[in-house]
Image (cartoon, helix red, strand yellow):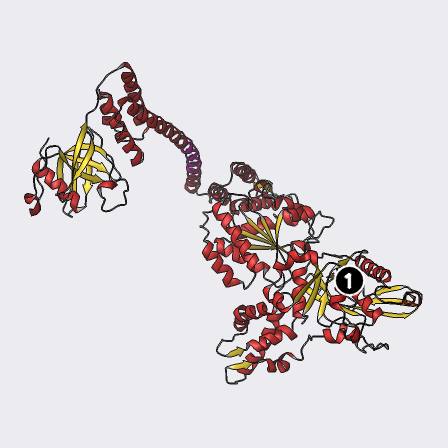
Amino acid sequence: MAEPEAPEETPKLKELPSLPEDALIILPVRDLVLFPRVVLPISIGRQRSIMAAQYAVREQRQIGVLTQRDPEMADPAPVDLYRIGTVANIVRFVTTPDGTHNIVCQGEERFHVTEFLSGWPFFVARVLRIPDAETRTPEIEARFLHLQRQAIEALELLPQAPKEMISTIQGVTSPGTLADLAVAYMDIPTAEKQEILETVNLAVRMDKVSKLLAHRIEVLRLSQEIGRQTKAALDQRQREMLLREQMAAIRRQLGEAEDTKAQEMAELEQAIARAGMPREVEDQARKELRRLSRMPEAAAEYSMVRTYLDWLVELPWKLPEEPPIDIEQARKILDEDHYGLEKVKRRIIEYLAVRKLAPHGKAPILCFVGPPGVGKTSLGQSIARAMGRKFQRVSLGGVHDEAEIRGHRRTYVGALPGNIIQAIRKAGSRNCVLMLDEIDKLGAGIHGDPAAALLEVLDPEQNSTFRDNYLGVPFDLSRVVFITTANMLDTIPGPLRDRMEVISLAGYTADEKLQIARRYLVQRQLEANGLLPEQVEITDAALKEIIQHYTREAGVRNLEREIGKALRYAAVRIAEGDKFPIRIDAEDLHGILGPPQFENEVAMRTSVPGVATGLAWTPVGGDILFIEATRVPGNGKLILTGQLGEVMRESAMAALSIVKNRAEALKIDPALFEKNDIHVHVPAGAVPKDGPSAGIAIYLALISLLTRRCVRNDTAMSGEISLRGLVLPVGGIKEKVVAAARAGIKRVLLPARNRKDYEDIPEEARRDVEIIWIEHVEEAVDAALCAEEEKAAETPREPESVEAAAEQPHAGQAAE
C-alpha cells in the first residue's frame, strides 16, 4: 500500500486501543459504491469519518467502504449500512485550505460484515473477505468477450469519450475486474450498483452488467439519432438565416433600401418556428408563408393571407405547465366567494380532485342551471382561480349563426375564427377555463344551428381535433375546461344536454340572502358608491326588511340594487356635510325606498271558499300561485281563464271530473253541476301558465267552492292528479318549498312520491314549513280544508279587490 501524506491528528487518536487483526475500520459513504480495483476520490465531512480516515493513515490500516441505505441520514447506525462493501487502501489524504477533507481510495476486494465492535469513536467491524473467483471456463470467457465489446461500444457512443478509458477496457484480462470497472463508471442508481457489488457469483454478475450495458447502449443510440435529426433541422434554418443576412448585406453594400417585405417574411418565419405548432399545422403555415412571399403587396389576397398567418402564430399551441391543484385552497376560495351552495361546492371539489389525480383524463362538461343572480358565472371564475388557470367567458345568448362557433371560411371578406378560438387566443393559454354563458338561449336561423356546432366542442372524445372553418387545421380543445350556464334545460337540445353534467342551483332562502348581503353585497356597494364602512351602517333588521318586502326573487341581483339605493341616500347626506356614521335601520326604509313592494296576501286571498294556493316553478325560481273558482247560473260548462296552457286546462278538466265522481261522498248536490257553470281563474292573466302540477290545487279550489269550506290560509300545495284520485309526482320541489317559506306559508302538501327530493330542500325552509306527504286526493281534502263548523256563510262574500290583490310580479312563464 502506498503511504499517503499523514494528516494532522487529533490527540485522542493516540490514546485509542489497537484494532484486532480480523477487524476493519468502516467508512460509511452516501450515494456512491466503491468496486475492487477502482480508484475513487471520496469527500468526508462527518467527524466520525474524519477520525476513521486519520486513524487508518496513522496505523497504515486498510478501510472498509460501506454504502448507506438512506443517503439523507446524517448520522447512520450500523443497521443503516449495507453489509457488503469493498476493502480499500487510502492512497492519498488531502485537507484543503477551507478545511474540507478528501481521500483517494483504491478498492481491493469485497468483504462481508460479520459483527460491529464498540470501543472506538468510529465504526469498526469484524469482516469476512470475499476474493474474486478467477475460474476461466468457456462460458465465462464468452461472457468476458461479449461484455468487453459492449463496454467499448458504449464508450464509443459517448460524446468526447476518453481514449485512455477504451485502452484500459481493452487491456483488462480479468472477467471480474471488467464487470466491476464497467458498472463503476456507468450512470445508474446507487441501489443497482450495490446489487452488482453483492453479486458474488461471477457468471450472474457478468450477465447483470451485460443487461445494464445493453440498455445503456440502446439509450445512447436513440439519443445520438435524435441529436442528428435536431442538428439537421437547425442546420437548415441556420443556413436560411445566413443566406438572408448575406442578401441584406449585399443590398446595403449596393446602396439599395432594405427590403421591408423580406424582413417581414423573416419575422413571420421566426414566429412560426417559435409557436410550437403541430407538424400538420406548421406545414400549412409554411405553405401559406411561401405563397405570401411570392405575392405582391398590392394584391387583394395579400392582407387576407397575412391576417391568417397572424392568427396561426398568435394562438397558444404549446401546453403550459399546469400548477398543482390544492384542494384545501380550492375549498377556501369557494367559501370566500360564495355563501351556501354546499352540494354545488362539494361537486366542484370532487371535479377538482379528479383533475388533480388524472390530469390527462376526460373531464366532464359542467353545466350550472339555475335562476338569474344565484352565482353561476362567479362559480366558474372561482374554479379558474382554484385551478390557477386563465378565465374567459363567451356569451351565447341570442347567437343564431353556426359561424359564431366554427368561424367563417376565408373566402369571405372580413372572415374571422369562431368565438371559441377567439376566446382561447384572448386567454393566451390552451388549458384555460372557458365559460359558455346562457347556453339555453341559443337560436337557430338560416345560417345553421350553433347548438349543433357545439356538439363537437363539448365532446371530450372529439374536441381534440376541433376544426375551425377559418383556421382549416385541427386545434386541440381537450385541455380546455368547459363550463356552461343556463336558466332552464327545456330549450337545450337533447344531444347537447347529454354531453353535460347538470348541476342545479336553486334560489336562496331569506337567511342565506341575509348572509350574502352582509358578507358580499354591502361591501361591494360601499366601494361602488365611494363610501367607507365607518361612514355608513346598515343594520340586519334593514336588510331583512329589504329581503322580505322590497324584493321577491331567487337570486340576489335586485337585493343588491335596493342596497345600492339605500347607500346612495347615505352618500348624498355625507356629500351635503352631514356627520357620519349614518345608520340605516328598518324604519328608515320607507322614506328611502318608498312603500313596501310586496306583502303577505295569503290570508286575504284565501278568506273565501273557492280559493286555493298553488306552487309554481318559473325560470327565475319558485313562486306561489292562486287558483280561484266560482259558480254562475248556466248549463254545466267549465270556463278556464288566466292564459292557461293546454296541459293546465286538461288538469282542470280532470279535477272537475273527479269532483263529479265523488260528489255523493263529498255531500255535494249533483244538481249544482247541471244548473251552474264552473269558472276557474288563475290571476296574473298576462303571464302564460302551463304544467300539470296545479291539479291538486284546482281540485281543492273546486271542493272548497262546492262545499263552502275554506282552504286553510297557511297551506299551499303542488301535485298532479289522475282520474283515479292519485297524486302524482312533480318537479321543482326545492324551488317551490323555498317560495312557500318566502311567502309566509306554514304547511305544504306534496306528492308522497316526491320524498326523494326532501334532502334537496334547504334546512331553513324545512324548519319553517311543515311538509305533508299525500298519496290520494282524499288525504289532501282532510289536510287542507277547514273543519265543517268553520264553513263560510251561505251567501258568499266576494272580496272587492280579489283581482287587484292577484297582481304580483312574475318574471317569466310559470310552469306548474
Which residue is at the front of the view, 750 or 205? 750
Q: Nearer the viewer, residue 812 or 600?
A: 600
**514 lies above or below 318:** below
Residue sitting at 29 percent across and 31 percent down? Answer: 195
Location of the C terminus by quadrant is bottom right
* Residue 536 locus on image (x, y percent): 52, 78
| 219 vs 265, nearest the viewer | 219
Query: x, y percentage for residue 139?
Result: 29, 16
Q: Is residue 752 rendered to the left or right of residue 12?
A: right
Residue 411, by quadrant, is top right
Position of 709 with respect to 238 (left or right) is right
Q: Is residue 475 visible?
A: yes
Residue ID at (52%, 51%): 350
Task: Give the farthest residue toward the top.
Answer: 138
Magenta stretch? 229-242
Asked if 192 appears above or below 297 in the picture, the reply is above
The answer to if 305 sits in the magenta stretch is no
Magenta span contains residue 232: yes
Give the secondary structure at mark 1.
helix
How far across and down, in percent of the image, does residue 38 sit? 20, 30
**The furthest residue to the bottom:** 578
Determine whether 292 is above or below 135 in the image.
below
Classified by dominant secondary structure, the portion drawn in magenta counts as: helix
- At a point 58% along the width and 69% down the height, the residue shown is 511
Task: Indicate the amino acid at tag 1.
Answer: Glu
Q: Which residue is mark 1?
A: 778
